[in-house]
Amino acid sequence: MTYGTTRAAAGGPTVLISGASVAGPAVAYWLRRFGYRPTVVEVAPELRDGGFAVDFRGSASLAVLERTGVLEEIRRHRTSGSPMSFIDEQGHEVASLPPEFAGGEVEILRSDLSRILYEHSLHGPAACADGAEAPPTEYVFGDSITSLVETADGVRVTFERGAPRTFSLVIGADGLHSTVRRLAFGPEDEFVSHLGYYIAGWDLPASDTDLATRPVGYNEPGRLVSVGRTARRAGDPECAGEVFVVFASDQLIHDRRDTEGQKKLITQAYERCGWRAPEVIPTVWGADGLYFDSISRVDVPRWSTGRTALLGDAAYGATVGGMGTGAAVVGAYVLVGELAAADGDHVTAFTRYEKRMRPFVTRCQEGGRRAGEFLAPPTREAINARNALLNDPQALAAMLREGEEMSAAIELDA
């Protein structure tokens, strides 16, 4: 168990945040700005490396990033979206996906974004909004919450490794498979809906450069296998490129910590797949890092209970296509803003936070509902229709406009 700060916290209500990916560090920053003492607990032993690129689009998320003070640094680490050609079995292009479709207005590796927000939540700002010295942010890595018990003036929390502690508030910013949501709201299957697809990604070792000359994607009904050396990995000598797959499936029963079992599921899903899939898919067995999850949507009837609230994917996630990263940083800003406006009255603040955010994120989530069928259409006819849409400049422009409008559909307080 390691700590991101050793300074003694003094003054201000204490807030425990579960999750140190994006939403957790983002809300920790804003809590410090208003005099709260945030503690972030993360089950991983350190900040997670690797992962897909994430993007921001629309005025709301860009405005929050600017107010957080990280927009320019994010732009310095931007990766830019990579174009992708959809190809037939002979490798001939049948449709193309322009870079702005995947990369939004600003794209960055999730690991880089997490690091930037982590550093900013630790070291800035020096002062609160009222001019007082900002409390420190504490990070606890390699630990996880095991129970939450609300008392008259706080939440008593036990951990797998650390000693029990009491906090004024608890925020679950721990993703689609949120521990806080499970402990405080109920079992995952009550809130997470499987949308019929699975998604996976891994790096190609440098020895496989011939598989990744350009970003391409090959479809068969209900399956996508894509591979390419994208701009964001061009300077990595140990990585020839990236593999990204999406396949249709009923919900699979598997251990989320069993990487070898997940590799077996991926391999089975691509048996007898055409093009160069028999060369691409087996590279998963040598991959050190693997991302594997269902394409799912989170719907929680209420985002708070007592002194505990949910943020980001834990409350309103959509695995892919739902603009979840932008919604997470906007949600962090709105949540803390409502706490400040309510002068710490968490019941009022949590209610206002949900009232303001729910219409916005519900609309964003609709993109996640369609993502699987767009990337891996279920029939040959649906593949042809998707390709025709991508080859129609007017239809493609309309899709991009729709995404921009959805991501801007919330008003922020000054």
Image (cartoon, grey):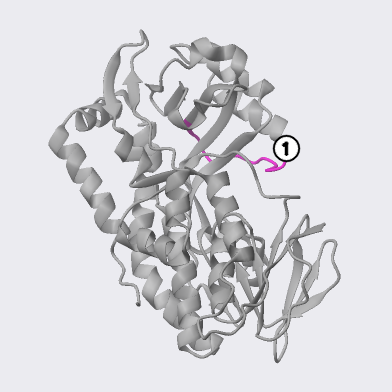
Quarter of the image with the C terminus is: bottom left
Question: Nearest the camera: 228 or 186?
Answer: 228
Foreground residue, 191 or 14? Answer: 14
- Rendered image quadrant of residue 393: top left
- Where in the figure is residue 44, as x and y percent of width and height? 72, 50
Classify the position of the N terminus by image quarter: bottom right
In-image side of 217 versus 302 (left or right): left
Q: Residue furthest top?
A: 90
> Magenta: predominant secondary structure element?
loop
Residues rendered magenta in the picture: 246-258
Q: Is residue 5 left or right of residue 90?
A: right
Local packing at callout 1 (Cα closer than 10 Å; few below 14, some 14-19, many 20+) is few
Residue drawn at x 51%, y 58% is 313
Residue 89 in view (yes/no): yes
Identify the residue shown where x is 38% and y is 62%.
Answer: 361
Q: Secondary structure at mark 1?
A: loop
- Above or below residue 232? Residue 353 is below
Is residue 369 shown to the viewer in this render? no
Instruction: Indicate the amino acid at tag 1.
Output: Asp
Q: Residue at the spot x=38%, y=60% of the render? A: 61
Location of mark 1 (residue): 258
